[in-house]
Amino acid sequence: MKRILLFSSMFALLFLGACRGGAAPMAAEAPADYYYDSAPPMPGVAQESSADNSGSGGGGETRATSVERIVIQNADIAIVVSDVEGQLNEIQVMAETMGGFVVASNLYQTYTNNSVLVPEATVTIRVPAERLDEALDSLKAGAIEVRNETRSGQDVTAEYVDLKSRLKNYEAAERELSRLLENAATTEDVINIFNQLAYYREQIEITKGQIQYYEEAAALSAISIRLIAEATIQPIEIAGWQPQGVARDAIQDLIYFWQDFVDFLIYFTLNTLPRLITIGIPLYLVFLGGRALFRKMRGNKKEEPKVEEKK
């Protein structure tokens, strides 16, 4: 009788977890750049409101309106600088000063149009989301030219709330299974309950990691920066000769030629050609009539009989 009650409780628990989770408990996939970190959640991200904490803990009762919006903001920027290595160091210092850090950096060599070897770099930093505009303004202030700037925002409030609901369900299942494990009477019961308990504990750790990812991604915005050397964008110049000027003039002359040619075709089609047609058709008809008359007269001469002279 005791085993029947034990397995009935386990079945009810699993059924309740499946209904609240919406399906068989599966670990939600983290984004591509998902990572685990033992550090506590970063400050400044949304937390659940007191109205949500006072609820029964059911997944269906949690609403996106009970938490602040969770928005992940990122930016990409390409700037031209006079000193690539110096600017790279300044960016690293700026990120740390703002309370962020450098995710990755890469300094490499590239060739200019004049086949001169110059440095170029890419760096990705994270800064507090509320200081994203300040960081971008600082980057543009130290640049000679801004080649490209892109900002993006991803609202993950629904995913965040769903993960919080799943975590509550998993933790409730863990507590119930722990209670059943303490009261298990046989080795078989202990093994079955322990396997279920290990599964739910794994889901709890995975879900906590995903929640932490969203909190940190929303609290710290990522900025991907490309540093282009000023020499890379300089025009080609050889002993005072700038071939780009010759190329520009050649292209301009080609454009002028096609403009004049198209103008000629339009003028010829609408003006000259109709005049030639109105003059040419009558002349051609006169030519045909004259040729016909000439042939007729020539034919009549051939048909005249020859008169023999009398001796």
Image: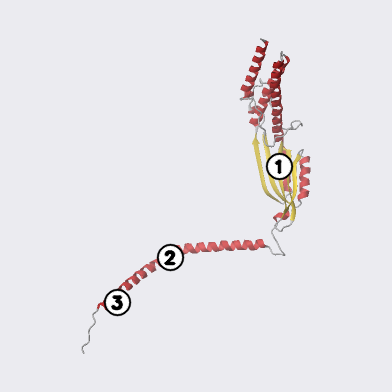
Specify the quadrant that holds the C terminus.
bottom left
Could you say where residue 251 lies in the image, as x and y percent from the top left? 60, 61
Front residue (pair 144, 239)? 239
Q: Nearer the viewer, residue 107 or 143?
A: 107
Mark 2 or 3: in front is 3
What's under tag 1, amino acid-wise? Ile
Which of the 4 image quadrants contains residue 296? Answer: bottom left
- Mark 3 belongs to which amino acid? Arg
Quadrant location, the N terminus: top right
Position of residue 128 in the picture relative to residue 252 (left or right): right
Residue tagged 1: 223
Q: Which residue in the structure is indicated by mark 2? A: 273
Residue 77 percent across, percent down from the top left: 69, 46
Q: Are marks 1 and 3 in contact (CB under 8 Å)?
A: no
Q: Residue at x 53, y 62 (%)?
A: 259
Left or right, 135 with reference to 276: right
Q: Nearer the viewer, residue 185 or 144?
A: 185
Whether tag 1 and tag 2 are in contact, CB under 8 A, the answer is no
Query: Does residue 27 sit above or below 77 in this rendering?
Result: above
Where residue 253 sits in the image (x, y, percent)?
58, 63
Q: Which mark is residue 298?
A: 3
